[in-house]
Image (cartoon, grey):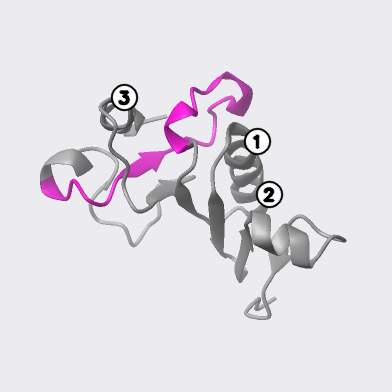
Amino acid sequence: MQGHEPLLRMRMAGNAPSYVEVYTEVLPWTVAQPWADWQRWNPLMPAVYVAPDDDLEALDLRWCVALRVRVFGRDAERVQAVADALKDAGAERILTTTFEPLCTSYWSPEANKRRTDALWVREAVCNS
């Protein structure tokens, strides 16, 4: 995992961003790696990279507690696994976007209350 250490320092100082972008892979259209140096070029938009070979159970996810998180990637299973780990660690809301196929889903406590049959709400924007 990369990009989380400055975020942990920010959180320990009592600050919190409005949301955090989490990448599950290096996307081909991402020229820059936003997680590499986000605190210098845009401190208001933290980015974290969870590598495909990172063990989710071993990651320090304290930084996500009570935060809104957006998870991006092409592998729908990996995106969902990362989102589930963030939810279990205490993220407030999670938006996931997969690109192959293009699909968006979200999780929030309010969505859970409205739809007790599913933890994740898959929107109608999925293109299979």
Q: Amino acid type of disc 2?
A: Glu
Name the mark nearer the viewer: 2 or 3.
3
Q: x and y percent of residue 18 in the render?
A: 34, 53
Which contiguous range is marked in magenta?
A: 41-64
Question: Which residue was labeled with disc 3?
Answer: 12
- Residue type at numbered disc 1: Asp
Do the CB atoms of the residues marked 2 and 3 lie less than 8 Å apart?
Answer: no
Mark pair 2, 3: CA separation: 31 Å
Q: In the image, residue 57 lies at what x, y percent? A: 63, 23
Give the image quarter of residue 117.
bottom right
Residue at 71% in and 65% down: 121
Residue occupied by mark 1: 88
22 in magenta: no
Residue 4: percent from left, percent from top: 35, 31
Q: Which of marks 3 and 1 is in front?
A: 3
- Whether 49 is among the magenta residues is yes
View extreme (left): residue: 40
Q: Which of marks 1 and 2 is nearer the N terminus?
A: 2
